[in-house]
Image (spheres, grey):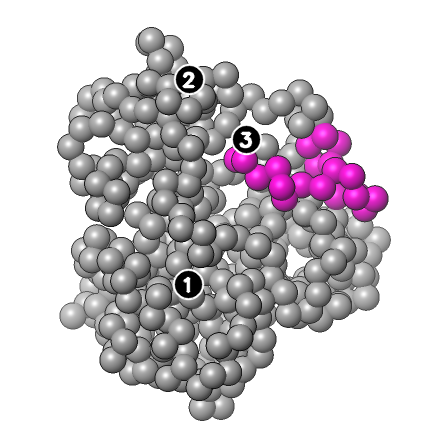
């Protein structure tokens, strides 16, 4: 079993409230996410994938930090940050949103939780949005407060996750709709529970509201879940590429825009409210995006793991784009990838080549997602 001394830690990188528990339960590797340690391996990633899709996994995603936006102008300020129309969003709802800069570039693709009419949480992927939002607020003239609350999520994901929740809470969450949340308490531990998660599988997120009780919460969930096949796990690269879930910094950054990422549905150029990047996104839509995200099925032997660098995509010797994320799917028995290609080279069925470390491989452009039975679409 791993011990804390096996890893190289410094105080400049924070640990989640579940860190010690993940070490006890056999974590083998971490990455850095929002300046925190994020568990990335509990052993075989293929076993982790099958645990997720057949049973359930518990993931420490405390590194998905929250930016709390509160105050009299909170709703107006949130709308300034995102091109998605929030006018009809009600307390208790969650929404998948984009945050864009003045050029229409994507700064983050978080889940937004509306806790009250004057209080929101931006549940972040990997970027320093608290600093960005504070900079915007300084010049906005709005009455808002921006902070990072004591809130650390665990992801309970997979088809058996409801059974685990029933063992913990009875039927209290049987009726919780997808992309909704509510407050809860477990053995006196304060929580917000949402029907969300970065997996494309049925699942929940448990936002711990008291960091001192992280170890206790982890053990309570694991004890309830073991009879249902629950195992400690990590967010599955295989499943998220199958479902075409973006990994910020890998598949998107400030140099990509919503239309390139097939996320124009998250942009409302017709709403009266202004938002950062509105003029730029209107121009991009009118001109048409220069690139488009597509899927690739790559020929050859199964990939031994995820790509750790970007791979060039060529056609007839000409560079036409980049593979951003790639993996072998044991369910589909295919090498699958997300790629950004020149828009006029992104037609379905096109034959291309991928420049990989072990040589050139043939690939075919395909639609996204690779696998999505329709059970967990982003709201």
Front one among 26 and 302 = 302
Please state the horizontal and vertical placement of residue 15, each as a whole percent of the image.
39, 66
| Front tag of 1 and 3 | 1
First reached walking from the N terminus: tag 2 or tag 1: 1
Left or right of 243 on screen, residue 91 = right
How dense is the environment of label 2, judged by Cα within 10 Å: few (below 14), some, or many (20 and up)?
A: many
Q: Which residue is mark 2?
A: 320
- Which quarter of the picture shows residue 308? top left
Q: Is residue 281 magenta?
A: yes
Quadrant in which the C terminus is drawn:
bottom right
Q: Which residue is mark 1?
A: 202
Q: How far apart, in angstroms, are the residues tagged by discs 1 and 3?
A: 28 Å
Left or right of 167 on screen, residue 6 = left
Q: Is residue 134 magenta?
A: no
Please state the horizontal and vertical placement of residue 366, each as a whole percent of the image.
38, 30
Which segment is the magenta one? 261-282
The residue under the point 42% across, 33% down is: 367
In the rendered view, would you say 379 is above or below 93?
above
Please state the horizontal and vertical placement of residue 57, each as a whole percent of the image.
31, 66
Please state the horizontal and vertical placement of residue 275, each as a whole percent of the image.
75, 43
How dense is the environment of label 3, judged by Cα within 10 Å: few (below 14), some, or many (20 and up)?
A: many
Q: Tag 1's secondary structure?
A: loop
Q: How far apart, in angstroms, are the residues tagged by discs 3 and 2?
A: 14 Å
């Amino acid at each position: 079993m791993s011990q804390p001394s096996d890893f190289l830690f410094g105080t400049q990188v924070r640990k989640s409230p579940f860190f010690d528990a993940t070490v006890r339960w056999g974590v083998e590797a971490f990455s850095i996410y929002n300046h925190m340690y994020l568990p990335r391996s509990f052993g075989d990633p293929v076993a982790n994938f099958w645990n997720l899709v057949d049973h359930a996994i518990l993931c420490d995603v405390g590194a998905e930090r929250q930016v709390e936006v509160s105050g009299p102008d909170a709703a107006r300020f949130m709308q300034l940050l995102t091109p998605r129309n929030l006018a009809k969003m009600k307390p208790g709802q969650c929404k998948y949103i984009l945050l864009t800069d003045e050029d229409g570039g994507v700064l983050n693709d978080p889940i937004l939780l509306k806790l009250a009419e004057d209080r929101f949480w931006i549940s972040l992927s990997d970027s320093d949005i608290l600093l960005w939002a504070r900079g915007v607020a300084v010049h906005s003239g709005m009455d808002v407060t921006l902070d990072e609350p004591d809130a650390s999520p665990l992801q309970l994901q997979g088809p058996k996750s409801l059974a685990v929740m029933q063992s913990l809470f009875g039927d209290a969450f049987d009726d919780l709709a997808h992309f909704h949340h509510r407050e809860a308490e477990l053995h006196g531990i304060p929580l917000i529970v949402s029907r969300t998660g970065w997996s494309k599988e049925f699942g929940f997120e448990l936002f711990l509201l008291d960091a001192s009780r992280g170890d206790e919460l982890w053990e309570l969930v694991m004890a309830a879940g073991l009879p249902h096949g629950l195992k400690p796990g990590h967010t599955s690269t295989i499943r998220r590429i199958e479902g075409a879930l973006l990994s910020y910094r890998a598949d998107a950054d400030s140099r990509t825009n919503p239309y390139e990422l097939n996320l124009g549905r998250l942009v409302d150029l017709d709403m009266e409210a202004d938002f950062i990047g509105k003029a730029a996104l209107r121009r991009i839509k009118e001109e048409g995006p220069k690139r488009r995200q597509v899927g690739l099925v790559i020929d050859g032997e199964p990939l031994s793991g995820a790509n750790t660098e970007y791979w060039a995509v060529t056609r007839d010797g000409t560079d036409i784009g980049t593979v951003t994320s790639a993996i072998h799917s044991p369910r589909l028995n295919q090498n699958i990838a997300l790629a950004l290609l020149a828009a006029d080279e992104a037609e379905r069925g096109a034959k291309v080549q991928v420049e990989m470390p072990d040589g050139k491989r043939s690939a075919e452009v395909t639609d996204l997602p690779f696998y999505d039975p329709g059970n967990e679409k982003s709201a």
